[in-house]
Each structure stands twice: as C-alpha cells, then as structure tokens.
Image (tube, rainbow, N blue to C red):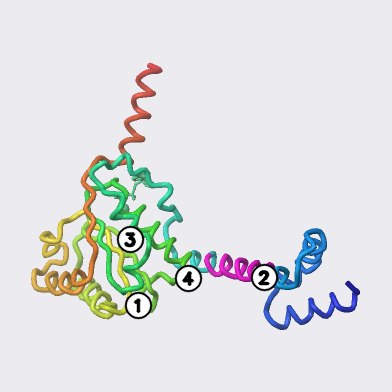
Amino acid sequence: MSELVSTRIRNTAGKLGLPHLTETINEYIRRADEGKMGYLDFLDLVLSEELAVRDDRRFRQGLRLSRLPHHKTMDEYDFSFQPDLDPRKVKDLATLSFVEAKANAALLGPPGVGKTHIAVALAVAACRAGYSGTYLRPSVLVVDEVGYQPLERAEANLVFQVISKRYEKGSIILTSNKTFSEWGQVFGDEVLATAILDRLLHHCEVISINGPSYRLKNRLKAIERENDVA
Ligand code: ADP
Ligand code: MG
C-alpha cells in the first residue's frame, strides 16, 4: 500500500477517534496479506479489534472510577470451602440480570465467609459488562459491611435516602454480618430500619453464607505449620 494512503488512513482514523487503528494499521495489512484475507474479513477484523480495545479501555476506566477495594473475581472464589452455599445462586447473580432489572442482592453471614469478595466480584463483572458503579447515578452500588458499626441518627437517615432514591432505579449489592431482624439495632430505630428494608427487599436476591471463615483457614494452616516446625 502506498505511503500516502496509509498516512491518510492514520489521519482519518485519528480524527474518527480510533487511536488503536492509527497504531496498528500496518500490522493489520501484514496479517491481511499473509492470510490472503477478503475485504469483508479484513473489515471485520479491523472493526472487531477496535471494539475490543475500546471495551477493554472502558472496563479499566470503570474499575478505576468504581473505587472498589480490590478486583477479585468469581473464579477466585473457592465454592468447595462453603459447601452450604449453592454456587448456582451466586452464578445466577453473576449473569447480572438483577442489575438489568434494577433489583438488589444481599449477602449475609459471619465474618470471613467471602461476602465482600462476592460483592466485589459482582461489581467487577458489572464493570466489565459496561455498567458503572459507586453512589446515586451508577447502575450498581456496593454497600459493604452493614452492621459492624451502629449508625448515628443522621447517618441512618442518609442511608435511608440513598436506598429510597435508588429504589427501582439502580441496583444495590449489600453485605451484612447481621440478620435483617437485627437492623433495628444497627440503625438505632426500628421504624427507620423497617422503611429501609421495605425498599431494599422488595426486589432482592438474598444469599446467606453460613460457614467457616476463609481468613481463619489460612491463619490456622500457618499456625499448624509453625507448630510442625517447633
Ligand atoms: P467477609 O466480607 O465475608 O468478611 P471477605 O470477602 O472479606 O469476607 O473474605 C476474606 C478473605 O478471604 C478475602 O481475601 C477473600 O478473598 C477470601 N475468601 C473468602 N472466602 C473465600 C473462598 N470461598 N474462596 C477464596 N477466597 C475466599
Ligand atoms: Mg466483608
């Protein structure tokens, strides 16, 4: 291909906002020559690679903006460690149909069972699918660890506002070490807790994980090793 045409293609791609193409046009042409590619296949290759690069960029930017504490995925969750947890329930959530439906997901259970891990993995999957995550506007809001600290009245009121403003508008993925019946104590007010739960649970998948702590599993192994050495 003449230098003139490839320069023009690079310029045009730049103006169209296709920076990846400006860098890779020669590589594409080499592949097309090698594979004796037809015009349709060539165009298909260029467009789908450009889209993949764009999706990846958007995913990484979404992850940055989401301010998640880490980016663990569902593949890193060992379901065999929690035999009472039905993997199908979690995998159903991971299809994100609840996000599409603007419904909620609640993960309940004692410390260390992986509530935060699963909540984060769902949020990462949502980012990958192109949904945004943080407070009022985004498609997915993760509210982690409801119940570790009792809330002041003003804080409890703010939680109520967030939950009622998002009701049927955007999903909440929530984790808690408390059962819903204990939320009156967490929010310092039974009436307010009931109003919050009413909105939260109207459309909500609830998953309870009642099993051993994964944190302690690793700890106990380390202690056993130390004892073996001793
Ligand atoms: P929780 O929020 O329920 O207290 P976390 O999600 O913070 O627990 O889990 C504690 C640590 O253990 C995290 O590093 C998490 O990735 C890991 N973890 C918990 N459960 C599992 C599991 N079943 N498989 C793999 N890692 C797990
Ligand atoms: Mg947690």
Secondary element at image label 1: loop
Residue named by callout 4: 130
**Camera-side mark, 1 or 3:** 3
Q: Establish whether ligand 1 lies closer than 8 Å to the Cβ of label 3.
A: no
The magenta stretch is 45-59
Looking at the image, which residue is at 39% across and 75% down?
A: 138
Looking at the image, which residue is at 25% across and 74% down?
A: 163
Left or right: 115 in relation to 67? left
Q: Earlier in the sequence, mark 1 or mark 2?
A: 2
Alpha-carbon distance for marks 1 and 2? 38 Å
Residue 5 in picture, x, y percent from top left? 86, 78
**Camera-side mark, 1 or 2:** 2
Q: Residues within 10 Å of mark 1 (few under 14, many from 20)?
A: some
Left or right: 180 in relation to 114? left
Q: Earlier in the sequence, mark 4 or mark 2?
A: 2
Residue named by callout 2: 44
Residue type at mark 3 is Leu
Residue type at mark 4 is Gly
**Camera-side mark, 4 or 1:** 4
Q: Earlier in the sequence, mark 3 or mark 4?
A: 3
Residue furthest to the left: 190
Q: Magenta includes 56?
A: yes
Q: Earlier in the sequence, mark 2 or mark 3?
A: 2
